[in-house]
Amino acid sequence: MKKLLITLSLFLCLCDQTVYALDLIENNYSFEKNIFMFKDTSSNSSFEKISSTEYSSRFEKLNVQNRIMDEPSSVYWLKISISDKTKNNNWLIEFFDFRISSLVLYNENGQKIDSVSHYALFKNRAMMHKNFVFPLRLKENETTVYYVKIIVDKESYISGAVRTFENFN
């Protein structure tokens, strides 16, 4: 019986990542909650690999210790689950660290939503802002999973927010 409980507890912990979601009730959320990161030291894992169930357990909850991206030879992946509990379908995601070399946002089906780079022309950004900003397409009372591929060439820090356009400045 004790082995069964331990096995069940371990299984629930490994599956726990899919349960967490950023429940959008207010208008502004920092990356303090329910963001998961995987550091791909091989730098060549495809979206299909990263989003597979095999890789699910490799994502770690973002915390103070693992927010620093300091290995230019690695690719950093974020997994963000967002559940819109509002009737406001007017959300965006913003990344604050301008030192990120490039950033690509994917939906859970692997469709590339947008990509930005601090090397690209500013006028080519979807949203002309000093930070990397992407509009989100959320459905009310449904959880949407986004993946973010981040490449750095110098030490950078994962920080950002999910907020309404009204709270964006």
Image (tube, rainbow, N blue to C red):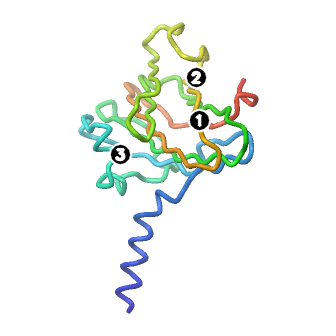
Kindly give the residue lying farthest to the bottom in the view shown.
1
Q: Is residue 72 left or right of residue 78?
A: left
Measured as percent of width and height from the top left, residue 66 is found at 45, 47
Residue denoted by label 1: 160
Sequence-wise first label, 1 or 2: 2
Residue denoted by label 3: 51
Badge 1 element: strand
Relative to 92, say whether 30 is above or below: below
Measured as percent of width and height from the top left, residue 134 is found at 56, 27
Which amino acid type is marked by label 3? Ser
Q: Nearer the viewer, residue 76 or 92?
A: 92
Distance in Å between CA atoms under marks 2 and 3: 26 Å
Q: Nearer the viewer, residue 131 or 126?
A: 126
Q: Are marks 1 and 2 in contact (CB under 8 Å)?
A: yes
**Quadrant in the picture for the C terminus:** top right
Q: What residue appears at the point 39 percent right and 81 percent down from the top-left corner? A: 6
Relative to 132, say whether 56 is above or below: below
Q: Are marks 3 and 1 in contact (CB under 8 Å)?
A: no
